């Protein structure tokens, strides 16, 4: 590809990252749900949390500290960019540079890489590690040097520290190694070296899992459970959703073929006259099939066989290599004529997806006639919480208690960076102890439909007896609809006597 075209491609990519990083936080009045939850986890620097492993919250916390509200959106785009980089490197080894470029561009035709990736979460965090593992395994198989197997083990360990579902990919690669043409590698030290590194990286988290009573696995089991016989239908629905997310890719390819149709007739001879026909243009077809389709199909089969409830968004990282599969299928003489139309078609799709997504962020509340999570008045809530606490206590706010959305929404932007005490099982917030509450107190928030009982350990009688209690109610307007009924929240402040500025209120509520 000419240097000028590479420069145009790079400029477009940088502009795309800038738009998706800077504009969303200016259009939204609160951070997305998963972002709020993960930041509140990440600042605690634990080796695990009750839903997920720790790596994604750690990294998100650092990006939020460094870039503020732009940080989570920038991190999502950097994850996508890193994913595409690994896809490109993998494609060069499997298909050559021309097809690698086509396949990488077509990957952005998977809808998961646009609007769904706006909200940084564990699925988005998996994307670059998923693609990196696929690339590292290929390098290790082709080169066979110990450092490549070490890198594979490191990426595998980091992947498992991000989300357990990356184990689906590792299982597929293990089956490929066991059943495929590379099985002789198992007699060497390389795969076992990779496994040893993976376990070493994962060891602190495994220790935490055991000490926590396997909390994330319990959560995962509850999320996967489906009553009745609908689980198998849900597994088929998962597969249908994944196909639907590939529709933009297929439309881009169809549009490119139609646009270049005058250049393609001669290439059509490759379908019948060439020795390969419709075969994949790679010397590693089994590996490409394994990477591109194996995890998604394996997860669907597990859902059908075991009756597991499969979430559609679990598929987000699984299709990093589907664009390469399509590029490998193209007849050889089609590749050059399709390059420019595919790049232009992908750019057009991304412009359209960007315009629709930003428009929905700006006007979605009016279209829905009800607020979404990102329409909550986060700045006003945080300011109200700080003002309420400062009026009652001269000590900094140390703990915000409540459901994980409301408490996190308030705690995340506050300068004191208070910890979040989640309503429910006290094991969900092990960083909040009775001793900490007795020393610094807490601000507890609840909505109208929540039980008026403070969460443990704040609700322990010995803790309540030692703290001064204040209570009240806030009413805040919705940012996008001032005429709607106000957001009503109930609060209680539990203040240590050494910090108190005011006399406690009566104990009834």
Image (tube, rainbow, N blue to C red):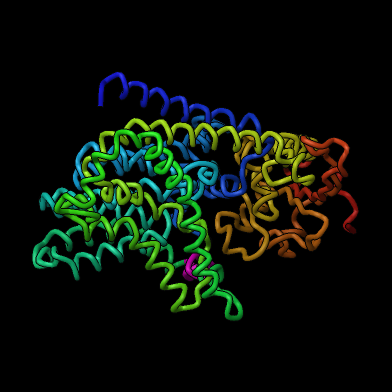
Q: Residue furthest top?
A: 4
Classified by dominant secondary structure, the portion drawn in magenta counts as helix
The image shows residue 129, relative to residue 263, as above or below, that is below
The residue located at (30%, 57%) in the rendering is: 291
Q: Is residue 228 left or right of residue 371?
A: left
Figure quadrant of the N terminus: top left
Nearer-the-camera pick, 377 or 58: 377
Res. 290 image quadrant: bottom left
**Residue 131 horizontal/vertical position (percent):** 32, 49
Task: Find the magenta span and give its range.
Answer: 212-219
The image shows residue 78, relative to residue 400, as above or below, that is above
Nearer-the-camera pick, 146 or 293: 293
| Residue 349, visible in the rendered structure | yes
Nearer-the-camera pick, 441 or 422: 422
Q: Is residue 504 left or right of residue 401?
A: right
Figure quadrant of the C terminus: bottom right
The residue located at (40%, 34%) in the rendering is: 259
Magenta highlight on residue 268: no
The residue located at (56%, 45%) in the rendering is: 35
| Residue 140, visible in the rendered structure | no
The image shows residue 50, relative to residue 115, as above or below, that is below
**Residue 176 horizontal/vertical position (percent):** 23, 65
**Residue 234 horizontal/vertical position (percent):** 54, 69
**Residue 295 horizontal/vertical position (percent):** 36, 62
Number of marks in the rendered image: 0
Q: Residue furthest bottom?
A: 228
Res. 264 image quadrant: top left
Q: Is residue 274 left or right of residue 455?
A: left
């Amino acid at each position: 590809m000419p240097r000028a075209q590479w420069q145009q491609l790079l400029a477009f990519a940088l502009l795309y990252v800038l738009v998706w990083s800077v504009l969303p936080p200016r259009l939204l009045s609160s951070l997305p749900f998963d972002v709020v939850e993960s930041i509140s986890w990440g600042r605690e620097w634990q080796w695990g949390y009750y839903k997920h492993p720790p790596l994604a919250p750690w990294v998100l916390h650092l990006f939020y500290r460094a870039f503020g509200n732009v940080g989570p959106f920038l991190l999502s785009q950097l994850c996508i960019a890193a994913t595409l980089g690994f896809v490109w490197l993998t494609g060069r080894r499997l298909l050559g540079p021309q097809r690698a470029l086509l396949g990488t561009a077509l990957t952005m035709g998977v809808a998961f890489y646009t609007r769904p990736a706006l909200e940084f979460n564990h699925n988005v965090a998996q994307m670059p590690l998923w693609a990196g593992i696929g690339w590292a395994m290929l390098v290790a198989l082709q080169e066979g040097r110990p450092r490549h197997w070490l890198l594979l083990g490191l990426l595998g360990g980091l992947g498992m520290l991000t989300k357990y579902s990356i184990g689906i990919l590792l299982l597929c690669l293990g089956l490929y190694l066991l059943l495929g043409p590379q099985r002789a590698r198992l007699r060497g030290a390389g795969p076992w070296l990779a496994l040893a590194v993976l376990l070493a990286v994962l060891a602190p988290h495994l220790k935490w899992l055991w000490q926590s009573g396997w909390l994330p696995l319990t959560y995962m089991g509850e999320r996967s459970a489906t009553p009745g016989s609908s689980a198998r239908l849900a597994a088929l629905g998962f597969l249908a959703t994944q196909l639907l997310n590939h529709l933009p890719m297929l439309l881009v390819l169809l549009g490119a073929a139609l646009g270049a149709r005058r250049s393609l007739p001669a290439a059509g001879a490759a379908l019948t006259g060439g020795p390969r026909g419709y075969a994949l243009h790679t010397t590693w077809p089994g590996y490409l099939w394994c990477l591109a389709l194996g995890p998604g199909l394996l997860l669907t089969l597990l859902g059908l066989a075991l009756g597991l409830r499969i979430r559609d968004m679990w598929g987000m990282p699984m299709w990093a290599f589907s664009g390469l599969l399509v590029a490998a299928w193209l007849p050889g003489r089609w590749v050059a004529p399709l390059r420019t139309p595919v790049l232009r078609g992908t750019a057009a799709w991304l412009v359209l997806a960007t315009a629709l997504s930003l428009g929905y962020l700006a006007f979605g509340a009016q279209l829905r006639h009800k607020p979404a999570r990102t329409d909550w008045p986060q700045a006003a809530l945080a300011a109200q919480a700080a003002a309420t606490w400062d009026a009652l206590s001269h000590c900094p706010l140390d703990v915000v208690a409540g459901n994980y959305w409301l408490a996190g929404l308030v705690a995340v932007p506050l300068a004191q960076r208070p910890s979040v005490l989640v309503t429910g099982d006290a094991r969900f917030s092990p960083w909040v102890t009775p001793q900490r509450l007795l020393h610094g107190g807490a601000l507890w928030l609840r909505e109208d439909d929540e039980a008026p009982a403070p969460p443990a350990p704040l609700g322990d009688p010995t803790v309540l007896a030692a703290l001064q209690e204040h209570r009240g109610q806030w009413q805040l307007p919705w940012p996008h609809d001032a005429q709607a009924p106000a957001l009503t929240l109930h609060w209680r402040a539990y203040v240590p006597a050494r910090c108190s500025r005011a006399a406690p209120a009566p104990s009834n509520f």
